[in-house]
Amino acid sequence: MDRELLGAHVICTNYGFWLPNEERGSGSDFVRSEALTKFGPANPVTHRRSVASKPYDREIRRLAKDALRYPEVILNGEQALSAATGIKNEIQKYGGTIWAYARLPDHEHYVIAPPRYDIRRFIGRLRGAATKQLLADGLHPLKDYRDRYGKIPSPWGRLPWVVYLWTEDDILRSVGYVKQNPLKQGLPKQHWGFVFEFPNLNPKDTNRSRK
């Protein structure tokens, strides 16, 4: 009998935070930027375990980031709040359940209930709403890097890292990790109006019934 997917822990990075040829491994199978090819080919991993704690050469990583087309995106507090407002508006309008969320300057964590459609598409929608809000507030971190057609590059990394959660213990462990993540970085405890305590669901997320 197939197991029921109960949730997912999703890690999303800003532009420049985690490169496709990261020495520790990445979720990419090719290097899009020609400037990065001199630092080696893509280094995809075939599992969903975190590789963040693996050792790596910090100087090579710094040089690779310096070779990027745009500067690495680091959100300040005002930008982080703007992005979160976009996420909140999207959830309130279209539904979706988030059990934990942490916004760090260079990446973010979600623990979510399974959406009505593909998880990566759902997260992409939230990131799009965050971008839209940053633009509306005049706070887009790459607003000074428009191309010749006036388009502003995305402030986000290309692909999220998804860890599937199959048990309540998995979810509770991930929620605890995400809540503690800002504190480990020396940041204040975070409270977000679009986060529901597990196992509660967003009332607008009508595709799932509370058990």
Image (cartoon, rainbow, N blue to C red):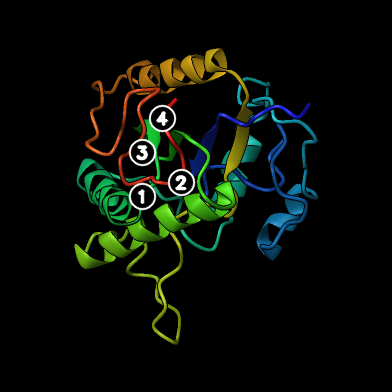
Classify 137 as above or below 183.
below
Contact between labelled residues 4 and 1, with CB atoms less than 8 Å apart: no
Residue 87 position within the rendered picture, expressed as x and y whole percent measured from the top left: 32, 50
Q: Residues within 10 Å of mark 4 (few under 14, many from 20)?
A: few
**Residue sitting at x 78%, y 26%:** 1
Question: What residue sits right under mark 1 in the picture?
Answer: 95
Q: Which amino acid type corresponds to the residue marked 4 in the rendered image?
A: Arg
Query: Mark 2–mark 4 contact, CB under 8 Å?
Result: no
- Identify the mark nearer the N-term, 4 or 3: 3
Residue assigned mark 2 = 207
Q: Observer-nearest residue: 78 or 112?
A: 112
In the image shown, does 198 or 184 lie closer to the viewer? 198
**Residue ID at (70%, 64%):** 34
Residues at circles 3 and 2 in contact by the CB criterion of under 8 Å? no
Q: Amino acid at mark 2?
A: Asn
Instruction: Say which element carries label 2.
Output: loop
Q: Residue at x 28, y 54 (%)?
A: 86
Q: Nearer the viewer, mark 3 or mark 2?
A: 2
4 sits left or right of 98 in the view: right
Q: CA distance from mark 3 to mark 2?
A: 33 Å
Q: Nearer the viewer, residue 147 or 157?
A: 157
Q: Seen in the image, is 82 located left or right of residue 172?
A: left
134 relative to 107, above or below: below
Q: Position of residue 108 (x, y in %)?
A: 43, 37
Question: Residue at the spot x=22%, y=45% of the render?
Answer: 81
Q: Which residue is mark 3?
A: 105
| First of labels 3, 2 by sequence position | 3
Residue 89: image x %, image y %?
Answer: 25, 54
Labels 1, 4: front one: 4
Q: Which residue is mark 4?
A: 210
